[in-house]
Image (cartoon, grey):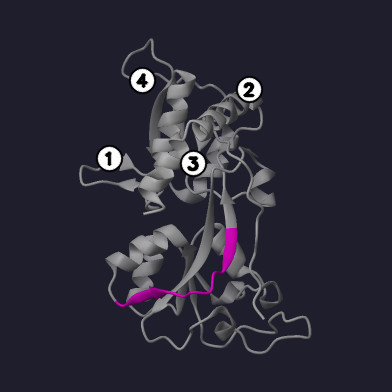
Amino acid sequence: MKKIFSTILAGITVFFFCFMTASCSNSNEKCLVMATDADFPPFEYLDENRNIVGFDVEVAEAVSEKLGMTLKIESIAFDDIIDEIENGKYDFGMAGLTVNEERKAQVMFSDTYATGIQSIVVKDGSEYTELDDFFDGFDESGNPIAAKTNITIGVQKGTTGDTYASAEPVDWGFGEENVNKYDTGEKAIQSLAEGKVTAVIIDSEPAKSFVDKYAGLKILETPYANESYAICVNKKNTELLGKINNALDELKTDGKLEEIYNKYIAR
């Protein structure tokens, strides 16, 4: 029996923290500064000109326009985003972030603006063809008793995939000792391609991009977890959060959010 972690999908909201009003090229301009990790296609990534582009970027631009402000984006380590928003260094964080209790203890989250799936990526011909294959026996409730020996799961450090995979088997994790943590999702995928890990747990959209890029890999049909994405802001910045949520509501109503989603996700 398989268990899929689930998070209820909400409406549409977002992001930005204390109006830092960081200076842009013009000292009279007001900026909203977004922290992201530009290694998460199609949500945020570098194009051929080294510009940060993607689904999250265009949504952030549309919200900034609604607020009459200029967007500035800085790419940092994914594992630092929540801490830096809490510390007030950036206005908001947007990087395919999933809401969980640990993160909510540090920051506030907007309404959901998209949903996602944690997927399992393996090499072609792998003996692991579904989620159950990674476990050795199940209890009367259908929960795993133990992870199979000699498996190693690759994850991006600090992601919910990391949290899920590092949990004990009774919670459908693989145990901390069986998880290799990488600075980026692509480094985890590279390790899989080189045969250094058994599988990688990663969000489905970047998983698709990486499987297209690295030959000999595939995504299992069994999803590992269902999630909702939201934008994080500093807990003191309720005014900004409210304005962003209103802007996203407008983007949902006028069809702009769906247009951006269709451009990057539903393709």
Q: Secondary structure beneath disc 4?
A: loop
**Would you name the residue on which mark 4 appears?**
24
Residue type (three-letter) at the residue carrying disc 3: Met
In 3D space, how far apart are the residues under numbered discs 3 and 1 (Cα atoms)? Answer: 16 Å
Residue type (three-letter) at the residue carrying disc 1: Asn
The residue sitting at the top extreme is: 28
Cβ–Cβ under 8 Å for marks 1 and 4: no
Say whether disc 2 or disc 3 marks the residue closer to the N-terminus.
3
Q: Residue at x 43, y 45 (%)?
A: 261
Numbered range of the magenta stretch: 216-226
In 3D space, how far apart are the residues under numbered discs 1 and 2 (Cα atoms)? Answer: 30 Å
Cβ–Cβ under 8 Å for marks 2 and 3: no
Say whether disc 4 or disc 2 marks the residue closer to the N-terminus.
4
In 3D space, how far apart are the residues under numbered discs 4 and 2 (Cα atoms)? Answer: 22 Å
Residue 112 position within the rendered picture, expressed as x and y whole percent measured from the top left: 59, 43
**Would you name the residue on which mark 3 appears?**
94
- Mark 1 or 4: in front is 1
Residue type (three-letter) at the residue carrying disc 2: Glu
**Would you name the residue on which mark 1 appears?**
51
Q: Nearer the viewer, residue 207 or 81?
A: 207
Q: Residue at x 39, y 18 (%)?
A: 23
Say whether disc 3 or disc 1 marks the residue closer to the N-terminus.
1
Cβ–Cβ under 8 Å for marks 3 and 1: no
**Is disc 1 surrounded by few (<14), some (14 to 19) or many (20+) residues within 10 Å?**
few
Residue 2 forms part of the magenta stretch: no
Q: Quadrant of the C terminus?
A: bottom left
Q: Quadrant of the N terminus?
A: bottom right
In 3D space, how far apart are the residues under numbered discs 1 and 4 (Cα atoms)? Answer: 17 Å
Q: Secondary structure beneath disc 2?
A: helix
**Would you name the residue on which mark 2 appears?**
239
In 3D space, how far apart are the residues under numbered discs 2 and 3 (Cα atoms)? Answer: 18 Å
In 3D space, how far apart are the residues under numbered discs 4 and 3 (Cα atoms)? Answer: 20 Å
